[in-house]
Image: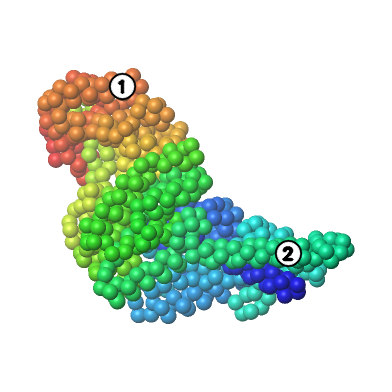
Amino acid sequence: MQRIDDRALSDQSALARAGLQEQADELPLEQDSSAIWDDAVIAVRANDGPWMAENLVEWMGEYYGHDRVYVLGPDNQPVRAAENGTTAPRRRFEADADAVLPSVQQLRRTMAEAASGLEDSTAAVLGQGELEFVQLQDGSANIVSVRPILPSSGAVTQRPGEEYLLVSVQAIDSALTKVIAAKYKLEELVYSGTASLLHSRAAVPVTAENGRIIGFLTWNARYPARELVAEVGPLLVVGSIFGAVVLALLVVRLRKTSGALQVSEAQAKFLAFHDPLTEIPNRALFEDRLERALASVRRSGSRIALHYLDLDRFKHVNDTLGHHAGDELIRQVAERLSSCVRDVDTVARLGGDEFAIIQIEPADDKGAEILCERIINSISHSFDLNGDEADVGVSIGVVLSNQTDGTPQDMMRKADIALYQAKATGRGRHQIFVGDLDDQVRHRRALERELRLAIAGDELTLAYQPLYNISGTTIIGAEALVRWNHPAQGLLSPDHFIELAEERGLIGALGMWVLQRACAFAVGTDLAWIAVNFSPAQFHDEHLADRVLACLKEVGLAPERLEVEITEGLLLERSAVVQSTLAQLREAGVRIALDDFGTGYSSITYLRKYRIDKLKIDRSFVDQLGHDSEIDEIVRAIIQLARVMKMRVAAEGVETPLQHKILQGMGCDELQGYFLSRPVTPERLLQMAGCSRPHALLA
C-alpha cells in the first residue's frame, strides 16, 4: 500500500513541476511571436511608442496575460514598460531590476560570444534567451523571460551589441496555479513561500538557477491506496467472506488511478512539443523534424520543401473582432493547412500568425507550387468566427533542400527571404527561393538604409502641383509631392520609395517630414490651402490627429488651410481609430479630401459617415473624357453627387484642352493636371501664383 501511495505522490510532484515549467516555456514562444519581426526592430529603434503599445509591450500583456513587460535598450535601460496590459512609467522597472538584470547580462554575454566578428548578429543569436524563476524584494516568486528583438528577414540589419531586449515577468500567483491545477487535477494547488507541515499537503520546491529554493507549490495530496482502504474499510468487519470482493475492488481502483496518472504524463509530454491553441507541432518539434528530414535527405539523396507561411490581414481581424476571434481564426487556419498536406508532411505553428510546412519528397518544383496554390485557395475562403465573417489571405515562401547548404538554419533563412519577397510583391501569393533573391533583399535593405538617412538628412525635397479654379486662370491651392534626390539614382518620385517606407515602418517619419515642410511653406504664402497626402499606414497611429495639430500649431498655420488627402481603401477598414482621427481633424478645421475617387469601393454611407469635404476624380476617368460617353456620364454623376452632398469636387490628370472644356461645362470646382501646370519648385509656385493665364503657368 505504501509503495502505491509513494508512487502516486511522486507522479503528482512530477506533474506539478511539469505544469510550472510548461507555463514558463510558453513565455519565450509568446514573446517571439512579436519580437522576431522587422517592424518591431524598426519601432524600438525609433522609440515609436504607439507601435510598441499596439504590437509589442502593452499588447503582450493584454493578449497573453504577461504581468509586466519591458523593452530594454542596448544600455539595458527601459525604453517602454507595461503592467497588466496598460502603459506603466519606465521607473516601474526599478522594482524588478535586481531580479531581471542578471538574466539580461547573461544573455548579453551569450549573444556577444555567438556574434563575435559578425556584422549582423541576427542568425547567430536567433533563438537565444534567458528563462529563470526569481524572487523579488517583496518575496513574490516570478518567471522572467528575456528575448532579443530581432529582424524576421534580411531586409533589416542587426549590429552585434545593439540588440534591444523584450522582458516579460509573470508572477507565480493564484491565476497561474489555477491553470496548472485544472490541467493536471491537482487539488487546491497554490504557491507558498514555505512548505506546509500538514500531512495532507504535498509540496515541491521552486528553485532559481543557482539552486536556491525560492518557494513551494503545494496541493492536497492524493493517496489512492489509503483512500481506497478508508472507503472500503467498513466492509472488512462483515467478514472474510467478502475479502475477495474487497481485494478485487482495490485492484480495479488502483489500476484506474495508475492509468489516469499515466494519461496526465502523456498530456504533459504532448504539450511540450505541440502548440496548445491548435494542437499542431510547435517550433521545438518543427525544428527537430526538420533536422531529421534533412538527415534523411543527406542519407538517401531525396529532397524536401520548406514552406514558411504568414497570414495577411490577421492583425486587422484581431483589432476589429477581438483576440478571441483571432484565436479561433488561428485554430481554423491550422485545420485547413493540415487538410492540405499528406500524413508524412509536418504542419507547425511557429508563433503568432506564422506557420511552417515540411513537405517530404515533392516530385519537383511544381509539386511544391501545387501545394502552395492549394493552400492559398483554401485560406481564401471566408472564415466563420463565432458568427462574424472574416477574410484573410496567406503569403508563402518556399525553399527546396537542394537550394541550401543542408543545414536547418540555412533552409529557414532562405524560406524567410522567399516569404519576405512574396509579401513585398503583393501578398496572397507564393515565392520559390531563387539565388538572386539574396541580391534583391540586399538591394532593398540598402535602399531602406539610404531612405532612413534621407529622412534624417537633406536629400528629400517637396514639389508643388497647383490646383486651379473652374476657368483654369487662378491658383486656389497646391498639393505637396515629395521627391528624393538620391545621390546615385538622381531625382526619384514617390512611386520608387513610398511602398518601401510603408513596409519598413518609415512612413510615419516620412509623412510628418512632408507635413512639417509643406505647412511651413504655406505659412509664408497667400495660398488658400495646401494639400498633403497621407498613407493608410499612418492612420494606425492613434495619436496621428494630435501630431498633425501640434505641427500646425508649431509652424503657425491655421487648420483651415490644411487639406488631408486620403484614399478610399482607408475608409473600408472600418477602424474606430480612423474614424476618431478624421473626426478630430475635421473638428479642428482641417479639410478631408478623398483622392482617386471612383477606383475603389466607397459608398455614400462612407462619405456621410466620415464627413468628406472634397472628392478628387481619378485621372483614369478624366483621361477618357470626350472619347467614352459612359465615362462622361459617370464623371457628371460624381460631380452631381458631390454637389448634393455639399462637397467640393476636383479633377486630377487634366492634360488636354478638351478635358478642360468638358469639366468646365460639367461644373467641376477645381482642376489639376499637366495642361495647367506640372509639379514645380516652391519658388516657381510663388512666381506663378500672381499670373492670370494658363499658358503662362506651364512649367
Tell me where residue 614 appears, x and y as whole percent: 32, 29
Question: Going by the image, does 487 lie left or right of 580?
Answer: left
Question: Going by the image, does 626 lie left or right of 169?
Answer: left
Question: Going by the image, does 694 lie left or right of 94?
Answer: left
What residue is shown with label 2? 248
Give the foreground label among 1 and 2. Answer: 2
* Front residue of 273 and 506: 273
Tell me where residue 528 appears, x and y as whole percent: 31, 33
What residue is shown with label 1? 641
Q: What's under tag 1, amino acid-wise?
A: Leu
Q: Quadrant of residue 149?
A: bottom left
Q: Is residue 525 visible?
A: yes
As helix, strand or loop, the secondary structure at mark 1 comes to helix
Number of marks: 2
Image colouring:
rainbow
Q: Is residue 527 above or below residue 432?
A: above
Outermost residue toward the front in this view:
241
Measured in 3D between alpha carbons, the distance from the residue under mark 1 to the one under mark 2, in whole angstroms, is 87 Å
Question: Going by the image, does 261 lie left or right of 233?
Answer: left
Q: Within 10 Å of the Cα at label 2, are there few (<14), some (14-19), or many (20+) other Cα atoms?
A: few
